[in-house]
Image (cartoon, rainbow, N blue to C red):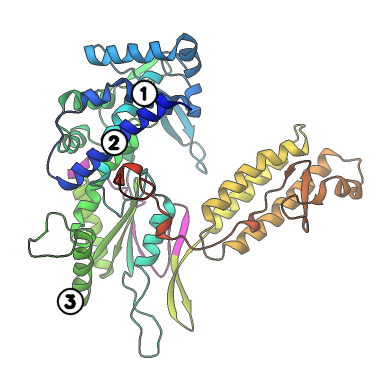
Amino acid sequence: MDTDRQADEAWILGVQRKLYQWSKAHPEDRWRDMWGWITDLRTLHHAWRRVSSNKGGRTAGVDGMTVGRIRKQGELRYIKGLQDELRSGAYRPSPAKRKLIPKAGKPGQFRPLGIPTVKDRVVQSAIKTFLEPIFEAQFWHVSYGFRPGRSAHGALENIRATIQPRKRDADGHRTRLPYPWVIEGDIKGCFDNINHHLLMDRVRARVSDRRVTRLIGQFLKVGVMSEEQFFRTKSGTPQGGIISPLLSNIALSAIEERYERWVEHRTKIRAHRRCDGMAAARGARQRDGKAGRCVFYPVRYADDFVVLVSGTKEDAMAEQSALADHLREATGLELSAEKTRVTAVKDGFEFLGFHVGMKWDRRYGYSPRVEIPKSKAADLRRKVKQSTRNNSWCSFGEKLQEINPILRGWANYYRYCARAGRVFTSIDWYVGKRLWIWLRRQRPKTPGGVILRDHYLRSQRRPTRRLWREGPDEQYMLAWTSVRRFRYCWMGQPDFAMSSGEPDA
């Protein structure tokens, strides 16, 4: 048992809880002294363990150092040297190595990815350890991207529950939609265009330790190396950096702030109120809806967001223009004029790779549906076909090991969709067909009956079923994945958000 590691984790968790509770109780104050915690050996050991256990530790930055090479030189010596650099002021971040990653489904388009050095990753992880509790206490509940315990499924369930019609007509049908229109937001080059000055103003509003804010500013301005050429970064957060998702969420919180009246009252708190800010916002939505006033409700996952609109299409169009101006002033970002559009909820829209729309039922009326888009199922079939078209020799077990992780990840992502079981069954049939074609190409002279006898065997998971198998490797069946509706209670919360007296704290 590593008692030193447990002691370090317990000390860090205690500090994080202190910061989280302070941030909750003092939303307008700034924390003034954090440098000692960040440069503490316990923090640097914790950050090193997180970086070294990640698969990205095998990737070197511009200095050519990897986790393996550092371990050969001695971890303790390396961490102590990093602490001395930080406390003496000699530490300077290195430029990130830029690598272009092809965008899925978009031939000829690439996404720039920055690879910081291992030393910079450790320092960024140490900063994030204590910066995250402060801002996590202030993030809005309609924000789901890159936050501990939250996922895309929670954002979709929020949308589904919000657009659910509740009022019934005289015939018992639900025909009146609470939010008939939706603004599909698309930010043009979000992570590359965030204004550094506006972002740092938001960071300084909660953290006033100049050594910490100065180091964050250095990470933003450090630049990138691409094909042995140095490029300065005048805007944006470095994609690939450990601290980048947190900084992006800090900047993009400006979207939720615009809709405070209908999301959560913070500056509108009154002394005579007995309810909290979220209950007050719920009451404002109900009162404005009854009075015929327009209501806007945002749901955001990182830089992807939608704004549900309870008014007319003209109201939605006007809000789209006003939101573009607000985002430009608050973050320096621009909405894409081509991709940002106003859509009728009845027609449906796509969000985070899912199709969200309304389904008419003759018994109940309209009900919201989160479904698998046909294009996503077609993309999966295309990927399986490309994998089974490869004629390079490998065993059948190795081919199953190549395909199964793709199928498992796809099934787990779409398992909470309506009618997902039918889509899973059709894909299982297609995968089985492609595996049969692949085997016939690999063994052209072998009779089909022999191939079936050798590879179409009883499943080890369900012996009553037969499927394609070789030894312990068998075809992953998507239809065996349990399909259900996602529940809010499945969303977790970070350990530092629970006090020491709560269960599992």
Q: In the image, which residues are magenta?
A: 329-356
Upstream in the sequence, badge 2 or badge 1?
Answer: 2
Dividing the picture into quadrants, the one containing residue 134 is: top left
Query: Disc 1 designates what residue?
Result: 122
The quadrant where residue 241 appears: top left
Sequence-first disc among 2 and 3? 2
- Residue 379 in the image: above or below residue 261: above
Q: Residue 168's x, y, as percent? A: 36, 83
Q: Is residue 350 magenta?
A: yes
Cα–Cα span, label 2 and label 1: 20 Å
Amino acid marked by disc 3: Ala
Residue 37 belongs to the span the image colors magenta: no
The residue where tag 3 is placed is 291
Residue 351 in sight in this render: no
Image coords of residue 369 (percent x, y): 46, 67
Mark pair 1, 3: CA separation: 54 Å
The amino acid type of the residue labelled 2 equals Gly
- Residue drawn at x 26%, y 70% as measured from the top left: 312
Rendering coords of residue 144 (x, y %): 35, 50
Tag 3, which secondary structure? loop
201 vs 257: above or below: above
